[in-house]
Image (spheres, rainbow, N blue to C red):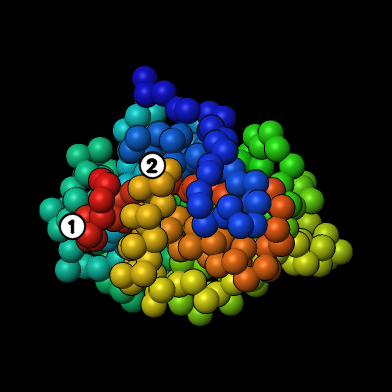
Amino acid sequence: MDTFNLPSPLEKIDLSFFHPFNTNLFIKRDDLIHADISGNKWRKLKLNLEKFKQGRYESLLTFGGAYSNHIAATASLGQMMGVPTIGIIRGDELNPQSNDTLKKAAVDGMNLHFVSREEYSWRYEADYKNDLRAKFGNVWIVEEGGANFYGMMGCADIIRELTVQADYIILPAGTGTTTAGVLMAENRAKIIAVPALANGDFLREEIMSLLRYGGLTDEDIDEKNEQLILPTEFAFGGYGKSTTMLIDFMNQVYEESGLKLDQVYSAKAFFALHRLVESGIIESEKTVVSIHTGGLQGNQSIKDKLIFD
Ligand SMILES: *Cc1c(COP(=O)(O)O)cnc(C)c1O
């Protein structure tokens, strides 16, 4: 049985960038939860797996693109826990040999179904979900990226595990599910979610609707909305894109501290943290927890430019 490193470690980190500001910086190492399963993907799948078991479902079905960390994590966890998994993959030109993510998912026993972009766009529709149930049997359906109620609730544990009181908690956002979970947990820290994709302003509404779905009242949601800071200028050109500046930054962080960041998510959040401290938006002398959400798979395409692997 594989072991999970939980609660994930909280490490104090010393980086010269932050010295002039006396920032008291901690990293919540969700990247260390498991070697194959990207940290926050485990958080999002945990309660979905429990639902699966309680409901006596036949398999767990989910959705993703060709390079999805969520698909990789679901396949790997399914293999580990003896849960049959089905992956609906965007792109009917693909096959199980198309790239390393898909190859690994297939080896882990995920039943891969490649669908056209049009069909993929139906993934939130109730009729389509019923079609999937008719085709694949009694399946527990998990939304793309683990973005459902149970995914969100699993992420609240990140905050429950903290042993310091932070003034700010910073993390990257893709679907915003992890951010919603972090907001669900009671904490007086300001939450800074850094969109890893361009024009990330829409995420505020996504996060608030997840919270509404989580049963929060309008009043609570207003409060959470105030608590959330969403800086959208650190996407570096969009999802999966990066620049020399970002890569240099990743190398510098590694050189000074040994911490490995990934270009898709954690490097953008960490870079944002640096800039927000430098510009005084995060004031001097504050305690900050940066959540390392995991997954270095995203560095494949830039591995020649990095001083670590
Ligand atoms: C998927 C992923 C995210 C995005 O999480 P959301 O809950 O979708 O916002 C962040 N970091 C890593 C490493 C991921 O794999």
Give the answer, above or below, for where 163 lies relative to 229. above
How many residues crowd mark 2 within 10 Å: few (<14), some (14–19), many (20+)? few
Q: Quadrant of residue 109?
A: top left
- Asked whether 291 or 308 is in front, the reply is 308
Residue in the foreground of this view, choosing between 104 and 264: 264
Q: Estimate the x, y position of residue 66 in percent, counting from the top left.
A: 27, 60
Quarter residue 264 falls in: bottom left
Task: Give me the residue at 38% from left, 66% from top.
Answer: 246
User: Does residue 10 show up?
Assistant: yes
Against 152, residue 10 (above or below) is above
Q: The disc labelled 1 sits on which kind of residue?
A: Asp
Residue 68, percent from left and from top: 34, 56
Residue pointed to by mark 2: 258
The residue that appears at 39% across and 28% down in the rendered structure is: 81
Which secondary structure, mark 2? loop
Q: Residue furthest left?
A: 97
Is 187 on the left or on the right of 171, as rendered?
A: right
Q: Quick one: label 1, few (<14), some, or many (20+) residues within 10 Å?
A: few
Percent of width and height locating residue 107: 20, 39
- On screen, residue 74 versus residue 44, left or right, reads left
Check residue 304 in the rendering and tell me which mark sits there, or answer none: 1
Determine the residue located farthest toward the front in the rendered image.
20
Q: In the figure, is residue 163 to the left or right of 308?
A: right
- The answer to whether residue 174 is visible is no
Residue 181 versus residue 283: which sits nearer the camera? 283
Amino acid at the residue labelled 2: Gly
